[in-house]
Amino acid sequence: MESFPFVNQLLQFLVTGLTVGAIYAMVAIGFNIIYNVTEIINLAQGEFVMLGGLLMVSTHVSLGLPLLLAFPVTVLGVTLVGILLDRLAIRPIRKPSVMTLIIATVAASIIIKGLAMIIWGKSPYDLPAFSGRTPIDIGGVIIQPQYLWVVGFLVAVAVGLTLFFNRTILGKAMGACADNPDAARLVGINVRHMVLLSFALSAAIGAVAGLTLTPIALMDYDRGAMLAIKGFGAAILGGLGSFPGAILGGLILGLIESLSAGMLDSGYKDAYALIILLAVLFIRPSGILGNLEVSRFKRF
Amino acid sequence: MVKKVAIVFLVCFAICGWTIQPALAEYKVGAIFSVTGGASFLGDPEKKTAEMVVEKINKAGGINGQQVKLIVYDDESDATKCNLLSKKLITQDKVVAVIGPSVSGLSLAVVPVFEKEQTPLISCAASYKIVHNEKTGKPYPWIFKTPQSDSLAVEAIYTQMQKMGISKIAIISVTEAFGASGREELIRLAPAYKIEIVADEKYGPKDTDMMAQLTKIKGLGPQAIINWSVGPSQVTVVRNWRDLGMEKISFFQSHGFGSRKNIELAAGAAEGVFCPLGACNIAELLPAEHAQKQVTTEYMNDYKAKYNEPLSSFGGHAWDAMSLLADALKAVGPDKAKLRAYLETKQGFVGQHGVFNFSADDHNGLTKEAFQMVVVKGKDWALAN
């Protein structure tokens, strides 16, 4: 039996953890975008991820569209679902309290999941990896090319969002809604449009997470809830509302899971992640990068 | 007001009368499968198969001239619903016997219901505990099951390992009833086959990646890995095993891997993976003189023709349960106690997953010979030697 030094094992755990963490981070970013503008937790966020994966399977594998075409089609398709979610479930609620809106997203997630089950059936689907399945071996550490895509997309999403929120009028307007919706309305920002945009944007990011994850872990209609929980955990850990926090939280969560599965007892890896999450919240109730002062003004 | 009440009464009577009327002499059989929810990959082919078997019986004139009415419910992979539906089948639908549920956890949850109501249940789930009362050391009187117990799959795998000279293994299992039960059996039976377990790893049913667990296993250098899970995660494990370049460590799957769909989903990574399978998965590979050759070939052709999808091993469990029940109904009629007594003494029933020989001490009726050891070769099963 060939030897497998501990350092290599450790690096392998890190690679795996960062990849899984990148997915969690993308889900967490989706949570944050909507939370910042509306103060609600969109519990259908995991469903966007699932739809991203399954729609990509339909466009890329079933319809045979090339990757470069299937990708935007899928993202646009899921974005449309996000827009519909806002128009059909969020906006019609007459006297919105945060709680009713959150419950509306729960209902929406159940409906989306049910429709996905009817459309795609119950079996899992696979997607060809974007650039082949030949693992890259760097000094004994195995990296799937798809891992690089996952991390790459996280970086792209992070850079894109930073530019959007800091450099564009639209992004700044969204930021204004997040800071104070009433004041934003006073200066002429259409808050409703911003809410719609936030749903569209987080659906698109969810779709990207889903379609990059599918070649690694397959996708089935039932996957959304679990990813939403993990992503939500990451968002809380990093500080709800903070984008750097979401990325940090996701990566930390992924690393804890991977390291504890590899070095401690794999049966309890989710428990270790939760213990760390609780410990962090105990010391810093607003999350690692969250701002307690700001969160006092929020309704949730 | 009086008029309204009268109308309501009339309507009620009309509905009651109408629903009572068609209760002619027919054999009512219940079925509970996890058609949706996490275990839908089990329940879906099971439901389709049970319906297909009943349709065939009824087309051929029914049993003893009576049509069979199959009432299928979906427990949505939820124990509470499964429990309620069991009671509904027994008390409202008044079925003579029930087949299902699909999952070990749910089957265990409804065992007390069927024991109390004294109604035969033929489960389609794997765990040995469904037909083994730990307090008495005997089977529960009213509970039977058709899938091979996981202990038989473990024995089949360990027997194959002995042939291959493997003695140092790692196990990795999913944290669900199926995985937990398989893991227990793997640990319990290992000493008898002189097999040492060096790693005992776990993962969640919706996990996206098992690289960490496999990396740890790789570091410990076992000769083989046994994975015990069902659903998409078992495909991910195989892919991770291949990615990590661990081909030198033989990979054994549980009988839960029994669908060609899994080989397809693994996208080439499943090549060389061992797996114990019931005869119905490999009907075309069986030698002509094999006892199950005829029933399995027939089932495979019927199923493919009717549903136009590849056969999964789980449908075979429902075939066995339904056919067994039909056989018992033919012999003793719709009497719960007589059905139970007949099933308990049934010998030599040739099914999809083995030749069943039931007894008072064995309500599963199978031995480890009910499994054929196969290996994935050229994207299909091949008999392992």
Image: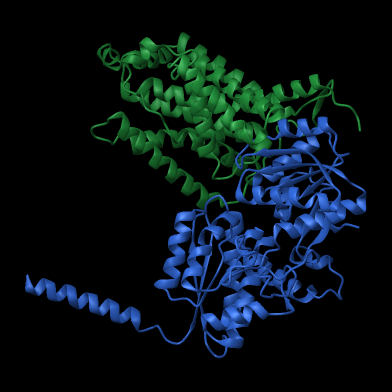
**Which residue is at a point 77% across and 54% down the rendered structure image?**
B154
Tell me: B194 left or right of B44.
Answer: right
Could you tell me residue B375's position as x and y percent?
Answer: 84, 53
Tell me: A181 left or right of B171.
Answer: left
**Which residue is at a point 50% across and 64% down the rendered structure image?**
B112
The part of the image, by quadrant, that contains residue A263 is: top right
The part of the image, by quadrant, that contains residue B35 is: bottom right
Q: How many marks?
A: 0
Residue sticking out furthest to the left: B1
Could you tell me residue B323's position as x and y percent?
Answer: 64, 76
Compared to residue A71, the image places residue A110 above or below, namely below
Scheme of image coloration: by chain
**Which residue is at a point 58% across and 78% down the rendered structure image?**
B340
Q: Quadrant of the C terminus of chain B?
A: bottom right
Compared to residue A145, the image places residue A171 above or below, namely above
Chain B, chosen colour in render = blue
Could you tell me residue B164's position as x and y percent?
Answer: 92, 50
Seen from the viewer's position, the closer of residues B123 and B46 is B123
**Which residue is at a point 77% across and 30% down the rendered structure image?**
B215
Compared to residue A56, the image places residue B30 above or below, namely below
Residue sticking out furthest to the bottom: B65
Q: Quadrant of the N terminus of chain B?
A: bottom left
Tell me: B368 left or right of B106.
Answer: right
Q: Is residue A65 visible?
A: yes
Q: Is residue B381 visible?
A: no
Could you tell me residue B31's position as x and y percent?
Answer: 52, 68
Chain A, chosen colour in render = green
The part of the image, by quadrant, that contains residue A273 is: top right
Seen from the viewer's position, the closer of residues B294 and B170 is B170
Seen from the viewer's position, the closer of residues A146 and A170 is A146
